[in-house]
Image (tube, rainbow, N blue to C red):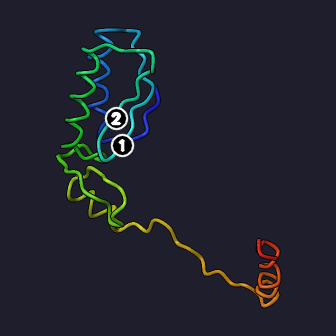
Amino acid sequence: MKITCGKGWEPLIQKTLNAVYEIDPNAKIGTAKEKFGYLAFDVAFDYYNKEIEDILFSAEKESKTICELCGKPGTINLDKFGFWLKCYCESCREEENKKIVIKVPELKHSKKTIKNAKRNKNDFNPKT
C-alpha cells in the first residue's frame, strides 16, 4: 500500500488498516493520501464492502481534526497562497507559512532573441 501524506496521520492509518484487515484480509486498498485537507483512501474499483467503507469514511472524518504533520489536534484551512486545503495544528501552520515554496529566477532575454520572436510571430498568423 502506498502512503502519500504526512506522518501525523500514520497512527490513524495504522488503526484503520488494522480494523479493515480484521474484517477482510484481502481488502483492496491501494493508497492513503491527503485530499482537500483530509485523509482519503483509494479502494480498487471492483472491490466493495459496506462495513469497510464505513471504517474508511470514519477515518477520513477523524483526520479532519488531526494535524497531518505532527498528529496534534488541527483544523482544515487554506494554505498561505489560498490554493490548498490543509489540516494543520497552529504551530505547524505557522512553520509551513514561513517556508519559501518556489524561488523564480529573473529571466533575461537578449536583443537577438526578442528580434527573432517579433520576426517569427507572423509565421503562425492564420491571416497571412
Looking at the picture, does residue 51 appear above or below residue 89? above
Q: Quadrant of residue 18?
A: top left
Q: In the image shown, does 37 or 21 lie closer to the viewer?
A: 37
Q: Which circle marks residue 35 in the picture?
A: 1
**Where does residue 30 sit, x and y in percent of width and height?**
45, 25
Q: In the image shown, does 37 or 95 lie closer to the viewer?
A: 37
Q: Which comes before the other along the chain, label 2 or label 1?
A: 1
Left or right side of 105 for 75: left
Q: In the image shown, does 47 or 39 lie closer to the viewer?
A: 47
Q: Which residue is mark 2?
A: 40
Left or right side of 103 for 83: left
Left or right side of 34 for 126: right
The kind of secondary structure element at disc 2 is strand
Q: Tell me the amino acid under the disc marked 1.
A: Lys
The kind of secondary structure element at disc 1 is strand
At 41% across and 9% down in the image, what residue appears? 26
**Where does residue 89 sit, x and y in percent of width and height?**
21, 53
At 33% across and 64% down in the image, what residue appears? 82
At 39% across and 32% down in the image, what residue appears? 32
Looking at the picture, does residue 116 appear above or below residue 65? below
Q: Which circle marks residue 104 in the picture?
A: none
**Where does residue 111 sit, x and y in percent of width and height?**
78, 91
Q: Tell me the amino acid under the disc marked 2.
A: Ala
* Crowd class of label 2 (few under 14; some 14 to 19; many from 20; radius 10 Å): many
At 82% across and 77% down in the image, what residue appears? 128
Q: CA distance from mark 2 to mark 1?
A: 6 Å
Q: Are marks 2 and 1 in contact (CB under 8 Å)?
A: yes
**Where does residue 92 sit, x and y in percent of width and height?**
27, 57
Q: Residue furthest front?
A: 127
* Crowd class of label 1 (few under 14; some 14 to 19; many from 20; radius 10 Å): some
Q: How many marks?
A: 2
